[in-house]
Each structure stands twice: as structure tokens, then as C-alpha cells.
Amino acid sequence: MIAPSILSADFSRLGEEIEAVAGTGDTRADWVHVDVMDAHFVPNLTLGLPVVQSLLKHTDLPLDCHLMIEDPDRWAIGYAEAGAYNVTVHVEAARDPVKIAKDLRAAGAKAGLSIKPDTPLEDHLDTLKHYDTLLVMSVEPGFGGQSFIARVLDKVRTARRLVDTGHLNVVVEIDGGINADTIEQAAEAGVDCFVAGSAVYGAGDPGQAVAALREQAARAGAAH
Ligand code: DX5
Ligand code: ZN
């Protein structure tokens, strides 16, 4: 699956920018990744619930809300209640991640847990049993257009093995620095869903970029 990140889109035209990846066939995104930043958990500020509510009215693509915020215990539920398809919180920010997952699911959303590049996966395996999505950060969260950190692929391989052996039941998603040069190694490591910001919205035709990335990932994943 390909999830274009609108962090790299034109914020004055977000509706149209989502339409650019909402066509039919190969050029259609699977999810639209929405980066919510609060200038506290990360040193950047983007958008919040009112913008997400407007986007939900504008598109039928599933919204994948990545909350890079403090106190997700308080704020995550609103995104689920608004109708986001998947709501991801950071384990480094959550006080009671199991309760968050239960609340998100009760509100009808998928629950996602994200880990920063230096956060070990092993410490959170019991928590992940309550989650639907594992978002492995392959850059330090905060900004688009950073370089891919390949060492996080060890965590992807571990997660892939745990899913394939029935010990975990999560979609393995990766976020940060995914482009034509890096997507194959991520696919080989076992990623299910690829977030791509600058590689999609920096391209002349975002829909074509989605199609090209998906094909590249499928080939690399199948060969492995
Ligand atoms: C970074 C965000 C990413 C970002 C990825 O903190 O979580 O979703 O948009 O951008 P690229 O694909 O340009 O690295
Ligand atoms: Zn993100």
C-alpha cells in the first residue's frame, strides 16, 4: 500500500492535492497520510482536528492520521470520532497506550502505534497486541524530505517475522525518506504500507508517482 503524506503538498490547496492521488486504478493512493504536529512533541507545527474534519468531507480515501503530539491520551480519540480510518500515536508520548488503542477501536478507527528510529521494538510487543498498525519511523519525526535511516529495517524484519508467525497482527508501515532509491530495501524487509511525502508531492504527477512506487515495492517484495 502507498500512503502519500500531504506534509509535502501545497497547504493552500489540500483538497485538490488529495484529489491528485484519488483517481482510479494504479494512480490511486491506498491511504492518505496526515501528519499532525504540535510544536512540542516535535519541533514543527502543521494542522489539527478542524483541518482533518474538512478533509474527511472532501475525500473518500481512508485518512491515516499520524499524531506527533504530546498527550495523545487526551487528543487521539477526536480523530477517530471524526472518522479517520487509522489513528497513530507515538509510544514515546503515550501514558496508557493500551487504553488509547481500546478507545480508538471503540470509536470505529484502526489503532496505530509509532516508534521513533531509536525506540526499540522489543519493549512494546505486549502493547502492540492491542494495535492494528505499527508505524516504524525511518527519519526523526518533524519534517519531510529527510534521508532514510536504513538501520530501522531491523525492526521491520522483526515485526514482519512476528506477523508471519502469528504472534502479532499489525500492518507494518514505514514513514520517512521513502522514494525510488529506498523503497525496494523497505519492501524486501517486509513493509506493507509505505508513506511517501516528497517523493509523491515533489513529483510532477503525484498519481503517477504513487503508481511507480507501488509497482517498485511490489516487484521488490515479491522477489524476496
Ligand atoms: C515526518 C512525517 C512524514 C513525512 C515524510 O515527520 O511523519 O510523514 O511527511 O516525508 P518524506 O517522505 O518526504 O520523508
Ligand atoms: Zn508521518
Image (cartoon, rainbow, N blue to C red):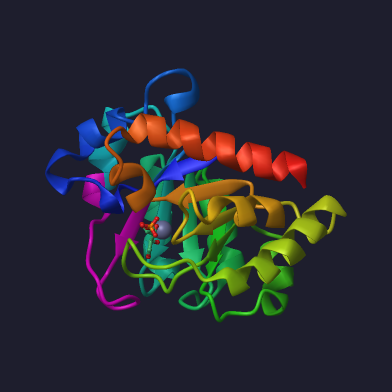
Residue 106 drawn above or below residue 212: below
Measuring from the top left, give residue 10's x and y in whole percent.
18, 45
Quarter of the image with the N terminus is: top right
Q: Indicate left or right for 66 with 135 as reference.
A: left
Measuring from the top left, give residue 39's x and y in whole percent.
25, 74
Judged by its main secondary structure, the magenta piece is loop
Measuring from the top left, give residue 211's x and y in whole percent.
47, 31
Q: Is residue 103 visible?
A: no
Q: Indicate left or right for 134 with 162 as reference.
A: left
Identify the magenta region: 34-51
Q: Is residue 189 visible?
A: yes
Residue 73 occupies which quadrant of the picture?
bottom left
Q: Residue at x 30, y 65 (%)?
A: 37
Closest to the observer: 15 or 143? 143
Q: How many marks?
A: 0
Q: Residue at x 67, y 63 (%)?
A: 156
